[in-house]
């Protein structure tokens, strides 16, 4: 069994930042990532609110973080899924689908995954017209008609990105206004985007590929069958905490890990950072800030410097 000073679960912005700070402080650090580095940030078309970068793609900023992280010695194991955690003893034990590890301390930065619509046709047409990533799949819909479902920043940014690719972009939101940042909304209004307000997708229809969506106006109860080639679902995220809850880490009613101001969980020596926590704002900037605190606390937990109070 490999032993580490620190194991970080997740290689998104929070996990990578924690790896940078832990590596610089001299901790022997392992980062475990179920998929590839970057998390949801890596598939964000562009970012305009990260300090110092007026406009940068999510992938570009992630690549910089990975390079920075490796420079300070953190080992990143991609495509390695955490199966279970054991916090019963002083050591923290991590079992993955490839190996078993132990560590003196742990940071959980596992992020979130896309929330589903859970409507008829969604499962059937995944990969055949239903997508959860405009950056990944937008090119397949060049010159076609697409609809984005959602009302937050992710939905608005996806619609903006697709407006430069698709022949027509529609955006359906269950309320009468978006929850996105004003700057994003202003950009969206200048693009060729049709809005369906107070509208919910009730069904996705097609044969081998998506052909239309059934929309219901929740104010008028009017039902519309809208011809469409692609559906981009952007209705929020669900925290990746199933394996965390099984290890008796406290989560809130939404499944997000409960942390204090020092990113500590209810388990001594176990910290959490980023979108997986109950922090009120889910942004790259806040994930980075939380990770800095978590990594600093993890260093204190292992090395017990004079300033560390436990």
Image (tube, rainbow, N blue to C red):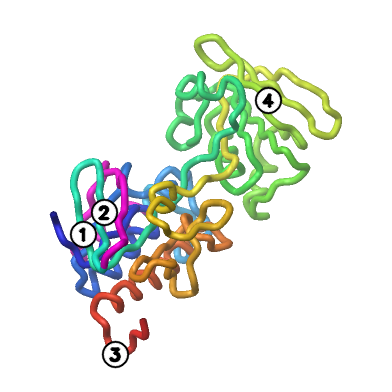
Residue at (78, 21) in percent of width and height? 223
Residue at (55, 9) in percent of width and height? 207
User: What secondary structure is marked by label 1?
Assistant: strand
How far apart are the alpha carbons under marks 4 and 1? 47 Å
- Viewer-side label of 4, 1: 1
**Is 2 placed left or right of 124 in the picture?**
left
User: Which image quarter: residue 197?
Assistant: top right
**Is 63 placed left or right of 223 in the picture?**
left
Q: Which labelled disc corresponds to residue 306?
A: 3
Do residues under tags 2 and 4 come within 8 Å of each other at their CB atoms?
Answer: no
**Is 169 placed left or right of 20 in the picture?**
right
Do residues under tags 2 and 1 come within 8 Å of each other at their CB atoms?
Answer: yes
Q: Name the N-terminal-most of marks 2 and 1.
A: 2
How far apart are the alpha carbons under marks 2 and 4? 41 Å
The residue wearing badge 1 is 102
Do residues under tags 3 and 1 come within 8 Å of each other at their CB atoms?
Answer: no
User: What secondary structure is marked by label 3?
Assistant: loop
How far apart are the alpha carbons under marks 3 and 1? 26 Å
How far apart are the alpha carbons under marks 3 and 2? 29 Å
| Bounds of the magenta segment | 62-89
User: Dividing the image into 4 quarters, which one contains the C terminus?
Assistant: bottom left
Q: How crowded is mark 2: few (under 14 residues within 10 Å), some or many (20 or more)?
A: many
Work out whether 1 lies above or below 131: below
């Amino acid at each position: 069994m490999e032993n580490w000073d620190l194991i970080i679960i997740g290689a998104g912005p929070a996990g990578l930042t924690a790896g940078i700070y832990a590596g610089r402080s001299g901790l022997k650090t392992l980062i475990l990532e179920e998929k590839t580095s970057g998390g949801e940030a890596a598939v964000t078309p562009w970012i305009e609110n990260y300090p110092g970068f007026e406009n940068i793609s999510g992938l570009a900023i992630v690549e910089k973080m990975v390079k920075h992280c490796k420079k300070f010695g953190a080992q990143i194991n991609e495509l390695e899924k955490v199966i279970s955690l054991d916090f019963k003893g002083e050591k923290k034990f991590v079992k993955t689908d490839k190996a078993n590890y132990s560590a003196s301390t742990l940071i959980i930065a596992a992020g979130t995954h896309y929330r589903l619509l859970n409507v008829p046709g969604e499962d059937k047409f995944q990969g055949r017209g239903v997508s959860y990533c405009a950056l990944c799949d937008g090119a397949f819909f060049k010159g076609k008609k697409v609809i984005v479902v959602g009302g937050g920043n992710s939905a608005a940014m996806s619609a903006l990105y697709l407006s430069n690719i698709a022949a027509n972009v529609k955006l359906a939101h269950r309320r009468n206004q978006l929850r996105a940042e004003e700057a994003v909304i202003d950009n969206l209004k200048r693009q060729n985007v049709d809005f369906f307000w107070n509208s919910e997708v009730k069904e996705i229809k097609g044969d081998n590929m998506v052909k239309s969506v059934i929309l219901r106006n929740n104010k008028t109860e009017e039902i519309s069958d809208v011809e469409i080639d692609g559906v981009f679902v952007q209705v929020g995220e669900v925290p990746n905490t199933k394996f965390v809850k099984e290890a008796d880490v406290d989560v809130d009613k939404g499944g997000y890990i409960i942390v204090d101001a020092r990113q500590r969980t209810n388990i001594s020596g176990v910290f959490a950072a980023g979108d997986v926590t109950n922090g009120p704002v889910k942004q790259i900037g806040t994930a980075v800030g939380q990770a800095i605190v978590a990594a600093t606390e993890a260093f204190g937990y292992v090395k017990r410097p004079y300033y560390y109070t436990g």
